[in-house]
Image (tube, grey):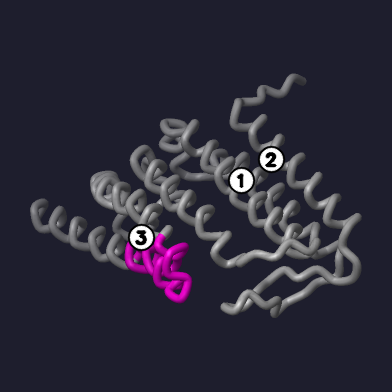
Amino acid sequence: MSVNLEKSDYASIGLLVLMLGVSLHGYLQVEGDVATHFDSSNQPDRTMEKLPGLAVLPLVSIAVLSLFKILPAVDPLKDNIENFKPVFEWLSVAIIAFITYIQALIVLWNTGSAFDISRAVVPAVAGIFYVIGLVFEKAERNWFIGLRTPWTLSKDEVWDRTHSKLAPWFKFAGFFSLGGLVFPGMLLEFVVGPAVVLSVAGTVYSYRVYSKLEDEED
């Protein structure tokens, strides 16, 4: 039985191979436990044994790739996913690229490179924000990807209007979050703040659109 691979599949596989190579390098170079989490002062506050510490993110990436292959088949709105399938598949590539970058930072830090790991994460987060904006421009109503509220999932129009409204703001958030590079003391505000604000604002907006449509139908 032949397996048809898309360009996004090759990209994901390539990233996984790269991540495994980085992880192997780390395994050969690191002695003792691996620092896997850092506090606001860039000091490690969580460590793991070397093998599981370096294997976690590659396994997460494999799980992500597997989920993105399974979800379209089990979503009750699978036909909608088919309508933006290329965007859906490239989102998985973006997520795996993000994880690969984080793995590289962890290996670099644990092999002796001196840098501010919190600030180094900022460009990757900015990229994810921008990708979310691109996805929101194309995503149709489904149960797995997008801003899923009771109101966006109830009506196509609510979904479409909410995601069209949020898409440019998530793109803007990508650029805004880069402020964390300039003002490292406000890293959380620049990186986490946009996600919280846009999630809350999108939820409220979806409710308002839904309520307005319901009133018009009465």
Q: Do the residues labelled 2 and 3 touch (CB within 8 Å)?
A: no
Element under label 1? Answer: helix
Q: Give the residue type at disc 2.
A: Leu
Q: Name the residue under label 1.
A: 97
The percent position of residue 169, horizontal first and vertical second, equals 30, 53
Q: What element carries label 2?
A: helix
| Among the 4 quarters of the image, the one containing residue 93 | top right
Task: Tell me the chief SS of the magenta region.
Answer: helix
Tell me if label 1 and label 2 are in contact, CB under 8 Å. yes
* Nearer to me, 39 or 16: 39
Measured in 3D between alpha carbons, the distance from the residue under mark 2 to the one under mark 3, in whole angstroms, is 32 Å
Rate crowding at label 2 as few (under 14), some (14 to 19) or many (20 or more) other CA atoms within 10 Å.
Answer: many
Whether residue 117 is in magenta: the answer is no
What secondary structure is marked by label 3?
loop
Within the image, what quadrant is residue 10 found in?
top right
Where is mark 3, residue-wise?
Answer: 149
The residues colored magenta run 179-199
The numbered disc on residue 171 is none
Amino acid found under the numbered disc labelled 1: Ala
Query: Which mark, by number, is residue 15?
Result: 2
Seen from the viewer's position, the closer of residues 21 and 201 is 21
**Which quadrant would the C terminus be assigned to in this image?**
bottom left
Task: Verify whether residue 191 appears in magenta.
Answer: yes
**How far apart, in angstroms, are the residues tagged by discs 3 and 1?**
27 Å
Q: Relative to 4, is 49 on the left or the right? A: right
Residue 31 sits in which quadrant? bottom right
Residue 202, horizontal then vertical, whole percent: 29, 60
Q: What residue type is labelled 3?
A: Thr
